[in-house]
Image (cartoon, rainbow, N blue to C red):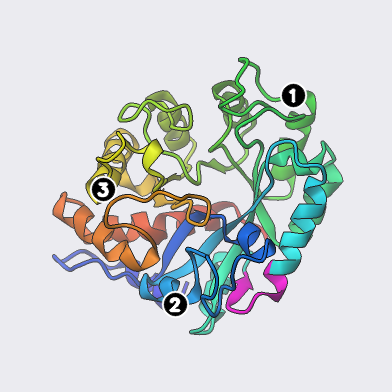
Amino acid sequence: MNGDWEIWSASDGGKKANLQTVVDLHVDTLPRISAGEGRFATGEGKLQVDLERCTRGSVRLLLTALYTTDGAPDPWGEVERMLGVRDQEQGLRTVTSPSQLETLQADEVGSLATIENGQSLQGRRDRVEKLHRRGVRIIGITWNGANDLAEGVMEDRGNGLTRAGREIVGEVKELQMAIDISHLNPEGVRDVAASEVPFLATHSNARALWDHPRNLTDEQIHCVGSCGGIIGINFYPPFLGEKGTVDVGTVVAHIRHVAELIGPEHLGIGSDLDGISLFPEGLRDHGDLHRLTSALESAGFSANEVEGIVGRNFLRWWESWCGT
């Protein structure tokens, strides 16, 4: 690889983290643009993520979720509309491999589309292939509830993937895509891991620090690490700690916990911006990311480790499985 990513192979030498390419593993910006709530390039409207704030935070890649709420009457139609918005939205450019980041212009941010809630597939394997053609590379099987593929963490009856769910995971693996387990129940996570498909948690935290069903147990964290995956730490305060106490240090604590279990090389950030209405103190948008990186360095993470957490780790993982 050439360009900005290349600098991350350098040794520490006591240097400060050089944040050339930050990656956010989960934003809900496309559903909000699709709903007419703002424009990415100009920053008009109510968006929490836009070009100006991405530029201030050195964000070069957004994993843009194609989210559909549980029970939506036409989830496939919603996904198609959001993909159309992505294709037309100024300032966002579809990327399907890490090397394409090198071709971005200064006024562009890469968009790697992900599915958040596999109900939109309606159990049809051909839709996975259609999504692949449109640039989607990561599939989140559920949102919080159950669907025809699996059970989410808020509707967990102790079952794993359904037959349709296993078939969808098989198609994802065949097409050199990946699975997002962030909303998936524990039995579903075990089934995904057993399938040997690449998988990650784009926006999840440590349950040992804050006991919420959306957070990962230490067992699940070890599972992600042993399979070579990535965990993106979520910025939503109800997933981080007690009301009124959550700040940048709380985010660092979750990062530290995961790092102590499986190593900092398995960490990323998955802010959940444009999908949340509460924020850690001092960390409201991408323009505040410098506070997080400074706090990580103060907590003892090396410059190379910080650079990995905010981008390099995901890019390395993505390159390890991505096709064309």
Determine crowd level at label 1: few under 14, some 14-19, many 20+ residues with C-alpha closer than 10 A. Answer: some
State the CA–CA distance, disc 2 to disc 1. Answer: 43 Å
Residue 49 drawn at (x, y percent): 49, 65
What residue is disc 2 on? 52
For the residues labelled 1 and 3, say whether their Cβ atoms are less than 8 Å apart: no
- Residue stretch in magenta: 86-94
Q: How many marks?
A: 3
Residue picked out by circle 3? 247
Q: Residues within 10 Å of mark 2 (few under 14, many from 20)?
A: some
Q: Which residue appears at 22% of the width and 53% of the height?
A: 296
Residue 168 falls left or right of residue 316 = right
Q: Residue at x 78, y 33 (%)?
A: 167
Q: How far across and how far down the image is residue 320, in percent?
A: 54, 53
The reply, left or right, for residue 227 in relation to residue 9 is right
Residue at disc 1, secondary structure: loop
Q: Earlier in the sequence, mark 1 or mark 3?
A: 1
Position above or below: 114 against 143:
below
